[in-house]
Image (cartoon, helix red, strand yellow):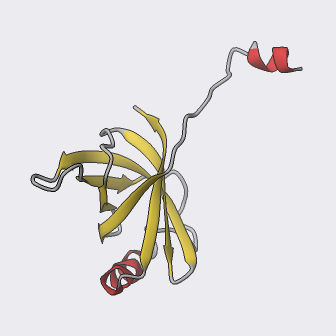
Amino acid sequence: MLTDLLGAGDLMGVLARDIDVRLLNVSASGCLVESRRRIEAGTAGALRLVVDGEEYSDDVIVARCSEVQGAGATYHVGAEFLWTTPPGVRSLRRMASRLQQALERGAVTLALEPRHAM
């Protein structure tokens, strides 16, 4: 059975890793996060964050990544929300204004889980 699976012509794999980021800004179309790691433009992933103990997530694509001058290995990453599914109850797109308020209170933790680079 494993040999059949590995021999399939449509076999595809995904390399994923969690990257801790700090949310700087969020809107209905995307967000700006800060990372200690460079994330290449075109990288698609799932952005997950926890606000007041509740998790929200959406698929994103990195539009830009720029090094913050004078801050060591610190990068600002602009990510756009992908409309791969309609926004659900736990969608970042739907909760953007509430999340911005939580961000201002410092009640947000999050991580970007890259799915693949384009």
Corner quadrant of residue 76: bottom left
Q: Residue furthest toward the front? A: 72
Q: Residue furthest left?
A: 70
Q: Relative to the observer, which residue lies in front, 39 or 27? A: 39
Q: Is residue 14 left or right of residue 93?
A: right
Does 51 sit left or right of 64 as displayed? right
Task: Please name the residue shown 36% across and 82% down the image.
Answer: 106
Instruction: Tell me residue 81's x, y (percent).
Output: 40, 56
Seen from this angle, which residue lies furthest right? 1
Q: Is residue 99 above or below residue 118?
A: below
Q: Viewer-proximal residue, 116 or 36? A: 36
Where is residue 2? Give x, y as percent: 84, 20
Residue 64 rendering spot, x and y as whole percentages:
24, 46
Residue lying at 89% horizontally and 20% vertically, measured from the top left: 1
Which residue appears at 75% of the width and 17% of the height? 6
Front in this rendered view, residue 101 or 106: 106
Classify 52 as above or below 30.
below
